[in-house]
Image: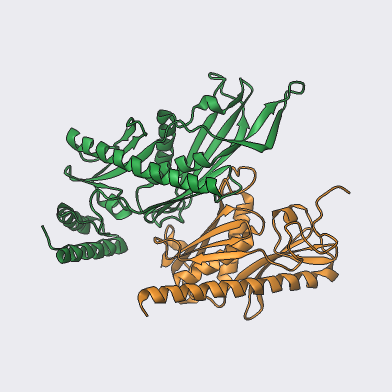
Amino acid sequence: MAGLELLSDEGYRVDGRRAGELRKVRARMGVFAKADGSAYIEQGNTKALAVVYGPHEMRGSRSKALHDRALVNCQYSMATFSTGERKRRPHGDRKSSELTLHLKQTFEAAILTQLYPRSQIDIYVQILQADGGNYCACVNAATLATIDAGIPMRDYVCASSAGFIEDTPLADLNYVEEAAGGPQVALALLPKSDQIALLEMNSRLHEDHLEQVIEAASKACKDVYAVLDQVVRDHVHEVTTLLGE
Amino acid sequence: MLLWFERKCLASLQLLTILYCSLRRKKSLWSLILVGFALESLKENCRPDGRELGEFRTTTVNIGSITTADGSALVKLGNTTVICGIKAEFAQPPAESTNKGYIVPNVDLPPLCSSRFRPGPPGEEAQAASQFIADVIENSEIIMKEDLCIAHGKLAWVLYCDFICLDYDGNILDACTFALLAALKNVQLPKVTINEETGLAEVDLKQTNPLNIRKHPVATSFAVFDDTILIVDPTAEEEDLATGTVTIVMDEEGRLCSVHKPGGSGLTAAKLQDCITRAITRHKEVKKLIDKVIKSIKIK
C-alpha cells in the first residue's frame, strides 16, 4: 500500500522520533509587558502564545459574576497564516469555540477560583503556527502564563496527545499523524496528584487498548511537566537576579 | 534647563501619576492635571521613559519564523509587538484590470494585546489601521500588482497580509508598515506554469522566486500636544494624552507616499516640515536594519 508509514519497522516515526518520545519543547515566560502574565511555547513546529489578564473586575455584564468564585474567560484563536491552507475564520467557528470551552473547563478545575469572588480572569491563547497538538500546546502555554500572572493554582496543568498505530501507543502527535485518522487521545493532567482535568478521544479504539494509550499520554504529560517546571524555576531565578537578590 | 537629577525625578513622578491614572481610569480631573504635567515636562525635553522628544524606541525585527506562512515578520518597537504573516493563494484577476493580482491587508487588534480591546468583531482602530495599510500599499507601489499576474485574465496571485498585534504600547501604524515591508521581502512564491492542453495551473514548489519589491515605504508617527510640542513614536500613555497624531510615510527617494493626520489639534506648515525631515532620517535607520536582517538570512 503506497502511503505514509507512520511507524517504521525499526520503530521510527515520520519525523524520526521513537514511539514514546516528545517533540522538543521550548518555552519562555513574561514575554509581554502589558499583560499580567504571558508565555510563549514551541512544541516542535507548533507555536502558541498565551496571555492572562486578571483577576480584575467583571467587564461587560455584571450579572454573570459568580458570588463565590472568579469567572474564567478564555478565548482560543488561530492566526490565519498558522495552517497550510489560509484559515478564513480565526475564531468563532465551531472548532475554536469547542476548544475555547475545553480550555475554560480545564482551567476552572485548576485555578483556585474561590479566592477571587465576583471577579474575572481572562486567558487568551493564540496559535501562531499549527503542527498538531494545538490544544495541548495551548494548555501548556496557559499554565505558564497563569503562573507568570501570579494566580494561585492547585497544580500545573500539563497536556499531551497520544495515538495508537500498529499496537503501539504514540505520544505527542504532529499534524501528519493526526491527519492520518487513527485514534487520538488528548489528555490534560494535574501531575502531582495524577488527576485528569480533561480527556478527549477521537475515532475508534478498542477498550483493551485504552489503558495503554492513557498511560502513554500520562507519561508524556509528566515529561512536559518536568520541562515546564524547569522553565518556571529558570525564569524565577532570572527575575530575582535582575532584582538584585 | 533642569539638572539631570531633577529631570529623572520629574520623569519618575510623571510615570507614577500616569500609572495611577491608568489604574484608576479616572479621565476627567486627572487628565487635566496630567496633561498639564505632561506639557510642563515635555517642554523640558523629558518623557516618562527617559527618551528625547525625537528618539525612537529600540526596534527589533525577526524574519521568517512562521514556516506555514509564505512570508512572515515579527517587529518589536519597544513593547509594541506586531506579527505579519503573508499567505499567497490563486484567484481570477478582476474584470476591469485583467493583468493585476490582489494584495489584501488585514490588521487584527485582539483582546490579548491590551485590556482596552474587547473580544468580538474588529473595532474602529483595527479597521482604520487596515485601511491605512491598504492605502500605503496602493500609494507607495511597494509591489506592482501586474507582477502578481500569472496568466492574463485567468489566474493571478492574491497576497493575504495578516497583521496580529501581540502587545499594544502605541504606534501601531509604524510597526505594521515595518512588518509589511519585512514580510514581503521574505515571501517566496513558487513558479506557476499553465499547462497548454488542460488549461490547469502547475505549481513547482521547488523553484521559488522572491517578490520584486520596488519601493520601501517607512512610516513615522508623531503625537501632537497642544499645537506646539511634537514627539516621535508615542507610547500608549502618550497617545492617550495627546491632542492629535500625524503619520508620515516616505520611500527611499525622499518621496512622500502618505501624510495621515486624522483631525486633532492644528499643526503649522513649519512643524509639518520638521516631521518630514525626521521621517527622512527614520527611513535611513529602518532601511539599514532591514538590509542587515536580509543579509544575515542569506548567509545561512
Write down the quadrant of residue A42 in the picture. Answer: bottom right
Residue B125 spot, x, y in % from top left: 39, 44
The residue sitting at the front extreme is B299
Q: Nearer the viewer, residue B209 or B67?
A: B209
Tag count in the figure? 0
Residue at figure coordinates x 19%, y 33% from the top left: B269
Residue B258 spot, x, y in % from top left: 34, 32
Chain identifier, colour green: B
Q: Is residue B86 left or right of residue A44?
A: left
Chain A's shade in the image? Answer: orange
> Which quarter of the image is occupied by the C terminus of chain A?
bottom left
Indicate the colouring scheme: by chain
Residue B209 spot, x, y in % from top left: 59, 35
Q: Is residue B10 left or right of residue A81?
A: left
Residue at figure coordinates x 61%, y 42% from the top left: A86
Is the residue A10 above or below the residue A115 in the image? above
One can see residue A113 in this view: no
One can see residue A46 in this view: yes
Residue at figure coordinates x 56%, y 62% from the top left: A41
Residue at figure coordinates x 63%, y 59% from the top left: A44
Residue B90 spot, x, y in % from top left: 62, 32
Q: Is residue B143 left or right of residue A12?
A: left
Write down the quadrant of residue A102 in the picture. Answer: bottom right
Q: Nearer the viewer, residue A67 or B25?
A: B25
